[in-house]
Image: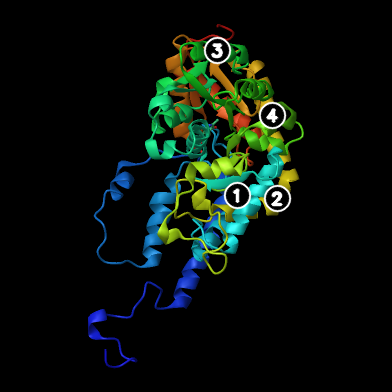
Amino acid sequence: MTSSSKQPAAIGSSETLDPQNWDELRAQAHRMLDDMIDATANIRRQPVWRPIPDEVRARFRAEIPREGSELGEIYREYSNFIAPYATGNVHPGFMGWVHGGGNVVGALAEMLAAGLNANLGGRDHVPIEVERQITEWTRTMLGFPPGASGVFVTGTSMANLMAVWVARTAALGRDTRQYGVSGEGALLTAYTSKAAHGCISKAMDLAGFGTDALRSMPVDRSHRVDVEAMRAQIKRDREIGLRPFLVVGSAGTVDVGAIDDLAGLSALCREEQLWFHVDGAYGALGMLSPAIAPHLAGLETADSVALDFHKWGQVPYDAGFLLVRDSERHLAAFAAPAVYLRRETRGLAAGSPWPCDLGPDLSRGFRALKTWFTLKAFGTDKLGAMIERTCRLARYLEAKVSAEPRLELLAPAQLNIVCFRYRADDANRINSEIVADIQESGIAAPSTTTLDGRLAIRAAIVNHRTDVGDLDALVAAVLEFGTRRSPGASAGRS
Ligand SMILES: *Cc1c(COP(=O)(O)O)cnc(C)c1O
């Protein structure tokens, strides 16, 4: 090292990954931004979804590039081969599964977050204060007391798994983190409904208890869990030496949108001293609607709630969240000392506890920013009204189905989900064909579920852009493809 002004040859070129020409980059960036805004503004001109041509799929079996390419060229590839073949959930005709529609404000915030490149695992910076702000907002929205803690995660699947871990540590004590789930831990059993989301069973598997340690209880005609059956099962399990520790209620089941009797489950958990977790993936945000909130009574008494801002909240993917009533118990499950994560009272290492103490992740992105922008841009009144409107649209669709003799309603629309089918012989096969036909047509994208052995066309109205015309188009398409697939089916036959 002789000269300080000259790079020693061995270090190589001082060229970074930043552009050589910022003006060119800026021009290209503005084109990309304009196109993204146009694509959303003109979304109705596009099909909801398109089948992927083989040659398009083949493009993504390429070698890893050794040489760089022009940004404009890469963007052309994106525009031609990626964007047109996305899921379609931005489109108002998308009603499959439970997918949020996103929003442009949230998308812009996501761009800003990427520019900031903040790591929200910990340390003392305002992005973490933004996440804490969302925790406070979520806490008050759900009616939780001060002292609750929260953390962004990918989605409710992860948040439910984390709730299982928190409940486990609460039941067995912190030592279980050292000794593992053995001995008494092997006796832990959890309770949920038959209609609960599959990720709860998976969480029991991933947490080391195994899916057999989850009791899936029967549901009533409205698909709400039978609380008395659960009470009896808990009693029987205790008698044979098992150790009940957790009840998972659903605030909006994924198949029909049923809300369990959360107050009843809460009372059962208090009596039995069990952890009460609520899977509020999409339904918990119903608290923003004065019409839906009363149906969620009891949610405010849960020990923990998992929810997704990316569903009814319309925040761009992904934005899952776990809220825990007692932050000490939350920390007990995840906080771990490490010399390289030492906390201070001043400097950048201040501000403990950090988000990495509240979940399994260390490096984490700034999911809170797109959520903060979305909540501020629209306000909770408007979001609540939008959520309520999706439920009114579901009732419109339900009425339309009920009035059409060629269609059959398979479950009452409790929130925003309508399950129905085209009447035909071999109805299960015909209806699954109809759904694929509609998806491939680009007219709409419903999905399917099976209720009491009957395959249902399932329309979950989550997207804030969906309107009456989209539901009319869905029904027209079901009748059209139904007639083609089952020309012999006559009106009114069941
Ligand atoms: C979507 C959903 C989940 C899973 O959440 P992800 O965000 O997809 O991981 C769990 N439970 C219910 C009721 C859901 O609707």
Front-lying residue, 3 or 340: 340
> Residue at the spot x=57%, y=51% of the render?
40
Asked if the residue under mark 4 is in contact with the one under mark 2, i.e. CB atoms within 8 Å, the reply is no
Asked if the residue under mark 3 is in contact with the one under mark 2, i.e. CB atoms within 8 Å, the reply is no
Residue pointed to by mark 1: 103
Within 10 Å of disc 2 (Cα), the crowding (few <14, some 14-19, many 20+) is few
Which one is in front in this view, the residue at disc 2 or the one at disc 3?
A: 3
Which circle's residue, 2 or 1, is located before the other in the chain?
A: 1
Q: Position of residue 392 (x, y in %)?
A: 71, 30
Within 8 Å of ligand 1, the CB of disc 4? Answer: no
Per the image, label 2 sits on a secondary structure element best described as helix
Residue pointed to by mark 3: 235
- Identify the disc placed on residue 296: 4
Asked if the residue under mark 1 is in contact with the one under mark 2, i.e. CB atoms within 8 Å, the reply is yes
Per the image, label 3 sits on a secondary structure element best described as helix
Which circle's residue, 4 or 1, is located before the other in the chain?
A: 1
Within 8 Å of ligand 1, the CB of disc 3? Answer: no
Which one is in front in this view, the residue at disc 4 or the one at disc 3?
A: 3
Give above or below for 96 relative to 342.
Answer: above
Residue pointed to by mark 2: 378
Mark 2 → mark 1, Cα distance in angstroms:
10 Å
